[in-house]
């Protein structure tokens, strides 16, 4: 999924933007294809370094998504045909 | 007391039966026999037990909503009301609802439905939706108070951070199938990525609602993929067949619904390491090449080369200078020689020996013969140190 250009990122043609909004799946996919490219080699030196930097960003995003501690547990309620949610309290 | 006609008697009996509050709506248990399924859609059969039998009729309106297909020798529970078919003077039980009685019967009904839905293609693998790999929100349709929801939440907590939306569902009893259908429909109106439909273990009767046709249809219609988790030891419920994925227990369903974040973390770590290795390798490749090229340059050799060649240049310059001197010298000698020879043949030398050059003044022409002049002409005589102006006084033909 392509996102609109952010100011200041200015990546070179064809590559997608990296935002913190990316889903875990997107950042993991991008990281995997990036590592493939790096391993294939035959890149110019500054290309290698640029990819490496991007990769570090993607890895950071992946890790932060996995470390997300908060999660919502809610109950679905139907009222007058409309759906609402409420917090679910687990009774022990 | 008068004399009844048959019709009157039958009517009277009918009134008695129909108006008796105890016989208004009753449950009866027995075995079906002599079942006729009329083309009109009405069923006619006798319901019997060991010692007795009863006529029954089940009209089309009832038959349409039956959840199984009655057959002779099936044991059933019937909810109905007594009536009298006055034309024949027969009392009969009018069926309002009918269901299989006993495990065997339940199982038969289950088989009927399973085969029918399978033939319809409801269980086809091609109909099954893939379960999303990284869901953001999971819908759970189960009891709010049972063990299932706790098990599911525990597994999710351990495995992967994801939001949960619970649609409280009645998972057993009369209201269960409608409740399940409702929960599935409600969850389809939310933004959940996958639904876990389940309950803890129980007997075939407890799980019966998960074998009902309305539930199967609701699962088939669901836009959101469904994992069914009806804790049953061996058999699959019809919900299991229809669902996009089946799990043996609610905990197992939670494990299927989300990836293991430990695995993912390790995977990301390994990717980071591979990335570092690849980057280091490409930098060191370049640095190795650079070293090699530097080593080949060897500044000392260059200096040597320069020194040798400048010495040679000096040497050549010296030789060239010497050669030029010699050439000039020899040319000068040549010049002297030629100058001498020139001098020897110079007319001036002749003049020094005493000769003179006579020229006609009027046109500076050299006089060679006496014919060139006439008496009285002005002429000049060039001698070694100048010119003498003369006049011709006479011309003779000899030299004295």
Image: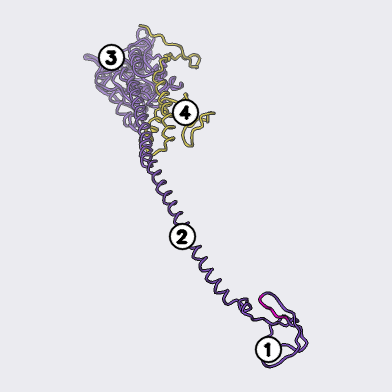
Q: Which residue is mark 3?
A: B202
Across and down, in percent, residue B390 comes to 75, 82
Secondary structure found at label 2:
helix
| Nearer to us in this view, B346 or A49 | B346
Residue B323: image tag? 2
| Nearer to us in this view, B149 or B135 | B135
Point out the stretch of residues depicted in magenta.
Answer: B380-384
Co-location on one chain, circles 2 and 1: yes
| Nearer to us in this view, B352 or A81 | B352
- The alpha-carbon separation of the residues under discs 4 and 3 comes to 50 Å
Position of B19 relative to B230 (above/below): above
Q: Quadrant of residue A23?
A: top left
Q: Is residue B144 visible?
A: yes
- The alpha-carbon separation of the residues under discs 2 and 1 comes to 55 Å
Quadrant housing the C terminus of chain B: bottom right
Position of B102 relative to B369 (above/below): above
Label 1, residues with CA under 10 Å away: few <14, some 14-19, many ≥20: few
**Sequence order check: which comes first, mark 2 or mark 3?**
3
- The alpha-carbon separation of the residues under discs 2 and 3 comes to 122 Å
Position of A79 relative to A52 (above/below): above
Q: Which residue is mark 1?
A: B369
Label 4, residues with CA under 10 Å away: few <14, some 14-19, many ≥20: many
Label 3, residues with CA under 10 Å away: few <14, some 14-19, many ≥20: some
Q: What's the coloring here?
A: by chain
**Sequence order check: which comes first, mark 3 or mark 1?**
3
| Image chain in purple | B
- The alpha-carbon separation of the residues under discs 2 and 4 comes to 78 Å
């Amino acid at each position: 999924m392509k996102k609109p250009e952010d100011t200041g990122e200015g990546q070179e043609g064809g590559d997608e933007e990296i935002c913190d909004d990316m889903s875990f799946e997107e950042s993991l996919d991008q990281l995997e294809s990036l590592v493939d490219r790096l391993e294939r080699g035959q890149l110019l030196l500054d290309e290698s370094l640029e990819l490496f930097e991007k990769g570090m960003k993607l890895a950071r995003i992946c890790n932060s998504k996995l470390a997300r501690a908060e999660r919502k547990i809610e109950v679905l309620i139907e009222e007058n045909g409309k759906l609402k949610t409420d917090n679910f309290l687990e009774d022990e | 007391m008068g004399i009844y006609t048959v019709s009157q008697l039958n009517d009277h009996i009918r009134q008695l039966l129909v108006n008796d509050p105890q016989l208004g709506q009753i449950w009866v248990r027995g075995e079906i026999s002599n079942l006729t399924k009329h083309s009109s859609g009405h069923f006619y059969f006798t319901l019997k037990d060991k010692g007795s039998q009863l006529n029954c009729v089940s009209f089309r309106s009832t038959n349409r909503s039956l959840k199984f297909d009655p057959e002779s020798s099936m044991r059933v529970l019937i909810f109905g009301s007594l009536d009298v078919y006055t034309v024949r003077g027969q009392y009969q039980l009018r069926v309002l609802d009918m269901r299989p009685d006993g495990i065997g019967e339940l199982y038969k009904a289950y088989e009927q439905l399973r085969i029918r839905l399978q033939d319809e293609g409801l269980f086809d693998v091609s109909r099954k939706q893939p379960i999303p790999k990284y869901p953001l929100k999971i819908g759970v349709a189960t009891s709010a108070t049972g063990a299932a929801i706790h098990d599911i939440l525990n597994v999710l907590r351990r495995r992967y951070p994801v939001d949960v939306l619970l649609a409280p569902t009645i998972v057993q009893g009369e209201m269960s199938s409608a409740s399940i259908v409702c929960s599935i429909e409600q969850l389809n109106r939310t933004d959940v990525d996958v639904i876990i439909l389940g309950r803890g273990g129980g007997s075939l009767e407890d799980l019966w609602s998960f074998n009902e046709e309305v539930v199967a249809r609701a699962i088939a219609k669901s836009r959101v993929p469904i994992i069914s988790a009806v804790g049953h030891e061996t058999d699959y419920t019809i919900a299991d067949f229809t669902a996009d994925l089946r799990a043996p227990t609610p905990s197992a369903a939670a494990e299927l619904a989300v990836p293991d974040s430990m695995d993912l973390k390790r995977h990301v770590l390994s990717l980071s390491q591979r990335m570092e290795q690849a980057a280091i390798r490409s930098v060191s490749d370049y640095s190795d090449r650079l070293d090699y090229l530097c080593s080949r340059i060897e500044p000392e050799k260059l200096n040597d080369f320069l020194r040798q060649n400048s010495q040679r240049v000096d040497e050549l310059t010296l030789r060239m200078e010497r050669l030029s001197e010699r050439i000039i010298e020899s040319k000068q000698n040549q010049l002297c020689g030629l100058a001498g020879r020139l001098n020897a043949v110079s007319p001036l030398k002749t003049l020094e020996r005493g000769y003179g050059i006579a020229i006609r003044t009027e046109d500076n022409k050299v006089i060679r013969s006496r014919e060139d002049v006439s008496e009285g002409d002005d002429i000049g005589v060039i001698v070694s140190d100048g010119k003498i102006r003369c006049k011709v006084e006479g011309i003779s033909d000899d030299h004295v």
